[in-house]
Image (spheres, rainbow, N blue to C red):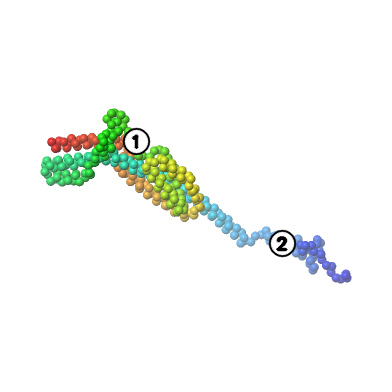
């Protein structure tokens, strides 16, 4: 090899020349890996473009908006849950009072219904006796009107609540005549334990806690059975239903809801609350509801007082009738 021929350059595996060597035709300061070149590259990497800064600000703003929306949805979710629990408690109170009104109405009819019928019959007899005496057309009209209000005369067994039947005195009537304590009529209001089980079941299995329609229907059918057992005061049936619910499938987990769905849920809960408030107002304004509110702790005592008043009225009317037919 002659001195005029260039020497072959040797390269490592990275493709760079060995230290101290340059690419052919370049000086040391002009090589691709020179200090100047590395400085320029480093400088160009540190100085970001205006477009990169703008995109970063937009991403930060989007993250901030997403965080605010998540916090708002969380607050709305808590509001919905609180409204649901408040509605359930209100519905339990309304249903409890409805059952009390229904049971007290039944007991009121059983114990006092025959007495009211007897008073109506005495009013009709008195009006007829007055009409027979005076012959006045107005008195005759009143007599016909009073007779039209009278229901069929109750039988002896109904009038005395089964104390006297075709076989004579019942054990209760015999006990009263012998001055022994008389057993009160069966209590139809649910016991405190039945109320506790009912409230617990209503809180756990209420249909309003379900999101899926199928689960709502399952809970609704179950609550119907719970209400029936509570209305009958059947504590054992309520215990069996509680065991059935505990052994059943767990309620499905709630899925994340959008803000629009949560707002719609709040509106539905508000409408439901208004409907229950109307039902409660109607129950409280009824005659039986007013009686219960007069003696909420012992409505049976109120029935006894009313019965005494009706018996006194019947005695007065019978005296009046006896005077007219003499």
Vertical order, 108 against 274 (above or below): above
- Disc on the earlier residue, 1 or 2: 2
Answer with the quarter of the image where residue 5 lies. Answer: bottom right
- Residue placed at 30% from the left, 42% from the top? 287
Relative to the observer, which residue lies in front, 136 or 75?
A: 136
- Residue placed at 22% from the left, 37% from the top? 314
Relative to the observer, which residue lies in front, 4 or 223?
A: 223
**Which residue in the protein does label 2 denote?**
40
Q: Is residue 168 visible?
A: yes
- Residue placed at 76% from the left, 62% from the top? 14
Mark 1 neighbour density, 10 Å: few (under 14) some (14–19) many (20 or more): few
Q: Quadrant of the C terminus?
A: top left
Badge nearest the viewer, 1 or 2 = 1
Residue 304, percent from left and from top: 29, 35
Q: Which mark is residue 298?
A: 1
Residue 12, percent from left and from top: 79, 62
- Residue placed at 80% from the left, 64% from the top? 11
Numbered disc 2: secondary structure: helix
Q: Is residue 305 visible?
A: no
């Amino acid at each position: 090899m002659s001195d005029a021929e260039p020497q072959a350059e040797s390269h490592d595996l990275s493709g760079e020349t060995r230290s101290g060597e340059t690419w052919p035709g370049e000086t040391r300061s002009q090589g691709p890996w020179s200090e100047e070149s590395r400085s320029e590259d480093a400088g160009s990497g540190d100085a970001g473009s205006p477009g990169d800064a703008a995109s970063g600000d937009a991403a930060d703003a989007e993250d901030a908006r997403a965080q605010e929306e998540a916090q708002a949805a969380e607050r709305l979710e808590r509001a919905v849950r609180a409204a649901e629990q408040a509605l359930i408690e209100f519905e339990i109170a309304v249903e409890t009072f409805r059952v009390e009104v229904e049971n007290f109405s039944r007991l009121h009819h059983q114990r006092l219904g025959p007495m009211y019928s007897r008073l109506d019959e005495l009013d009709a007899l008195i009006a007829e006796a007055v009409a027979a005496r005076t012959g006045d057309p107005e008195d005759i009209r009143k007599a016909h009107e009073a007779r039209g209000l009278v229901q069929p005369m109750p039988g002896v067994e109904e009038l005395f609540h089964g104390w006297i039947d075709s076989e004579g005195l019942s054990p209760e009537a015999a006990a009263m005549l012998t001055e022994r304590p008389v057993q009160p009529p069966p209590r139809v209001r649910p016991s405190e334990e039945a109320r506790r089980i009912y409230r617990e079941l209503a809180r756990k299995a209420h249909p309003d806690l379900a999101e899926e329609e199928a689960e709502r229907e399952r809970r609704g059918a179950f609550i119907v059975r719970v209400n029936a057992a509570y209305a009958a005061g059947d504590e054992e049936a309520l215990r069996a239903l509680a065991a059935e619910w505990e052994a059943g499938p767990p309620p499905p987990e709630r899925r994340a809801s959008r803000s629009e769905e949560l707002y719609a849920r709040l509106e539905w809960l508000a409408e439901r609350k208004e409907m229950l408030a109307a039902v409660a107002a109607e129950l409280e304004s009824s005659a039986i509801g007013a009686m219960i509110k007069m003696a909420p702790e012992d409505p049976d005592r109120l029935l006894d007082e009313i019965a005494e008043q009706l018996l006194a009225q019947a005695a007065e009317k019978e005296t009046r009738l006896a005077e007219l037919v003499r």
